[in-house]
Amino acid sequence: MQALSGRPAPGAPSSSQAGAEPAVRPAATSRRPAAKKAAKPATTPADPRFPHGPLAVLDGDGSAYAVDGIVLDCPATTIIELVEWTLKESGLGAARLNRNGKDSDPLIILTASAAVKLGLPERLEGREERRSLRLAEDHPVVKQIGKAKWRLTQRGFGPWARIYRKAEGSARQCVQLAVLSWDALDARSWPGVADMDPADIARVLGVYAKSVLTPRGSTAVSGLELMTALRPPTRAVQENGTWVSGHNPGSLGSDPMDPAPPEAIVEHPVVVNSGWSGGFLNEEAYQWVRDPALLSDEECLLPYAVGLDLNTAFLAAAARLTVGLSAPDHFHRPVFNKKIPGSWLADLSHIELDPRLPSPFTPDGTRPTGPVWYQTHTLAYAQELGHDVHPIEAYLRRETGAYLDPWHDRLKTAYVDTLADLGVTADLTDAEFLAAMEHHKQADPAMAAVLAAIKATVKGGIGKLRERPQGRTYRDGEPWPAMQRPTWRPDIRAAVISKARVNMHRKLANMVKLTGLFPLAVLSDCVVYPSPGASPLDFLPYAASGKPLMGGFRLGPAPGLAKLEGVQGMAWAVDLMEKGLNPARHIKGGDAVLDDGE
């Protein structure tokens, strides 16, 4: 294999200026400034095994753009040569996030010209390839990989491809590829990134890799993979003087676990094979609009409807969240215990609440009509409101833990730090915060893209906990790939969403106590209020000292705090409500994506 050659860019620092050379590096590298304003560069990797960071963007001229402005020369002209260069010469990779975990495999992102140079089509061609999002099994590149004794995972060679050989001892032999022209970077999760120059793409993905993890597919896939990376299923344990692989306490283990029937979905074998007809857990995010007949004349005369959006509400709900780690056990007439995670069948239809607020017990905010399955947090909130709770039956888990804590902590830090890089910090006054949020995306589009990816990682990771079967040929009752992994845990997803919805209702109820204001509509983590002014400062509760009052909605950059979602006229909101439409979906000026964790 040809050695790497360095091509110093004009004005590049000398080795003495740049600091000590890494312990492992190719023959030479060059450092080039990005063509456009890029994300804040990540710091130099501390692990000497990976001197050039976690990933590189390969262009058609053989330039591989890594983090910190490093440009490597890659001589590969085939996929096999690229894999071998990446593993043997590139110096790419990332250290494990947990001492019991695995190092991250190096990631190579291919531009359209690089893909073509390596024998790949610029776009997936043919009806079958576009439908399956992968190359056909008889494509020359796929055959080339097999002939060289390399393997592809079950998802084949698609926008995100993993090429590997069986590990030799503890050393993994695996490279991940992402093909930009095959839409590897979804514009909703990575806005504008696919159209950036290679150096800028490397910096954006490098910042994400350093603060979250090396991307391993879509942001949803990465969100789920981050859970496992931080809570590995196994650890080394001693048995009879020999080190073997054993269960890692606090993790979800290595084997999939069947859900309780009410926690599953109608397609699941547990439901189909048992003939279950006892109902299902329906812990979803709010989609509620107040009955227009309950609007007062005073509310209708207010000039504005103002939308508030809670920052990463699901991430805030994941903090210190106790979930089940073992299989569910079935109980009849159990005594409710708010400390035990699980699913409870209970009748809350007797509870009467103010109809100007959504019911905290249903996603559509209507009053329940009989016995329904609830997650622990929902029943605990009924108790908090002063009502007796008498479950009819329950599926509960004896082994519990705060499985999502490290996931929450890492993503919270990434979110807050990225906002700070965009000029939105915790020390701003509320007025300064609103002003900073109004322009933060324009301040640095690259870092704004990182922020969008972090938010998508939260939402998608929670959604992946209950990934549904896909494909036209699927039949109910058949197992599907997602449900055969330990992280297919609809009960954990339900716990997060239940807690998030309860948190929202608690704030709504406290706003009534603090201000007398009732919401017009709620859509997941967005709530719309009637307001005398066009700013949240015109209706949010503040003390005489100017400090925000606790309990209601508060502005700020942290998860769970609020920001401005949008402003419209009150007449506009009332018109939508009378048509049966949700103002919270449109308050931003477009059609909001329903953030329900799917």
Image (tube, rainbow, N blue to C red):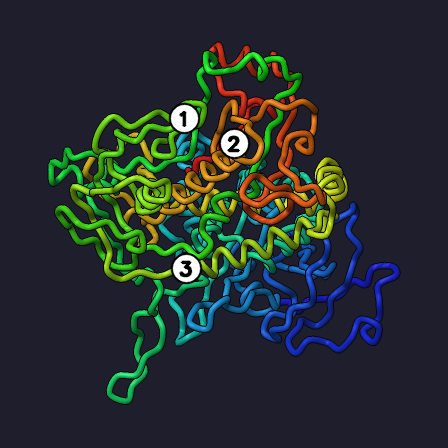
Mark 2 or mark 1, earlier in chain: 1
- From the image, which quarter does the N terminus lie in? bottom right
- Which image quadrant: the C terminus? top left
Q: Residue at x 79, y 57 (%)?
A: 32
Residue at label 1?
A: 354
Percent position of residue 76, x then y: 60, 58
Front tag of 2 and 3:
2
Tell me what residue is drawn at x 84 percent, y 67 percent. 13
Dot 2 and dot 1 residues touching (CB under 8 Å): yes
- Name the image quarter holding residue 69: bottom right
Residue 541's place in the image compared with 30, above or below, is: above
The residues tagged by marks 2 and 1 sit, at their Cα atoms, a distance apart of 11 Å
Amino acid beneath label 2: Val
SS class of the residue under badge 2? helix
Q: Residue furthest right?
A: 11
Q: CA distance from mark 1 to mark 3?
A: 42 Å
Mark 1 or 3: in front is 1
Query: In the image, is 413 to the left or to the right of 162?
Result: right
Q: Looking at this rendering, what residue extends furthest in the front direction? A: 544
Residue 448, x across and y down, in percent:
67, 43
Residue of label 3: 228
